[in-house]
Amino acid sequence: MTANVNHFMKEHFNNLILRPPLFYSWKYGIRFEISMPGAEHEDNSNLQQIKDRSIGIFNHVFQDADEILLITDIYCDKYNTFLQNRPINVYRKYVKNKDLLKKLQHSILPHLFEEEDDGDYDELATHRFLLPCKKSDIRYLQLLVAISYEDFPHPTQILRRNMAAGYDIYFVNVTRKMIYHLYDDRGCDVIAANKEDLRTLYTECDEWILDYDREQIDLLF
């Protein structure tokens, strides 16, 4: 499984390591603002904007027939037994067809942020889960909402029973060679192997682009 992901990233993204921040790591990308700056997370208008923008961008990136890799990276102590004792609920809760879970693959990778974090890197690891699927196979709206609650107490929190760990969830469009990463309620990165595959997204979702990076994004197009 890891070899397949590595091959995809090598062939289409010049060996880019799949880790955040994708927008600042790749030449063709757009960074979107998802939530309202300064708004309370539970404000109804803010929750509606989070939903509208995250799902709107998702629907631009993924079409019904596209082949998708749903990838979840969990960052934790390599001796953390949580993931062995309790299968990750990203897949149990948000995959419609439970038979599809037979294709779920798991591997343990080295810690992906060694040069950025303090501490004993030998004690840290990345658990990577991967599921090949289609858009219709997953409850993506509910999953995107859950991701937006990463920093807020809520029953949908992905790792609410294992808060010592961190995570990232990537939706990789194998067909269109694009990657969608809603990193939390604040923002979303979309990168593509081909700049032109981002043009429609850039044009139709222009008002959602993060102002801080707008100049860089405008220059790209």
Image (tube, rainbow, N blue to C red):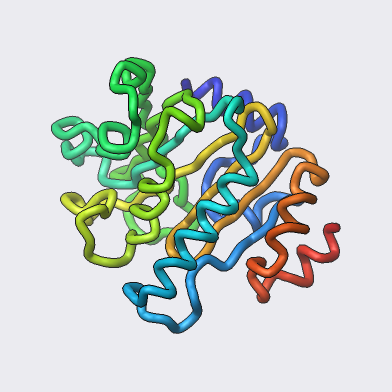
Q: Which x, y percent locates residue 167?
A: 37, 49
Residue 192 image-quadrant placement: top right
Q: Nearer the viewer, residue 115 or 42?
A: 42
Q: Nearer the viewer, residue 101 or 23?
A: 101
Residue 102 located left or right of residue 114:
left
Q: Which x, y percent locates residue 69?
A: 51, 30
Q: Which x, y percent locates residue 22?
A: 60, 52
Q: Nearer the viewer, residue 73 or 76?
A: 73
Residue 49 vertical placement versus 57 (above, below): below
Q: Residue drawn 55% across and 58% down?
A: 188
Residue 118 vertical placement versus 132 (above, below): below
Q: Residue drawn 36% across and 80% down?
A: 40
Q: Residue drawn 47% across and 25% down?
A: 133
Q: Nearer the viewer, residue 118 or 129?
A: 129
Q: Which x, y percent locates residue 30?
A: 68, 57
Residue 131 located left or right of residue 190:
left
**Total marks placed:** 0
Q: Residue drawn 34% across and 53% down?
A: 146
Which part of the image, by quadrant, shows the C terminus?
Answer: bottom right
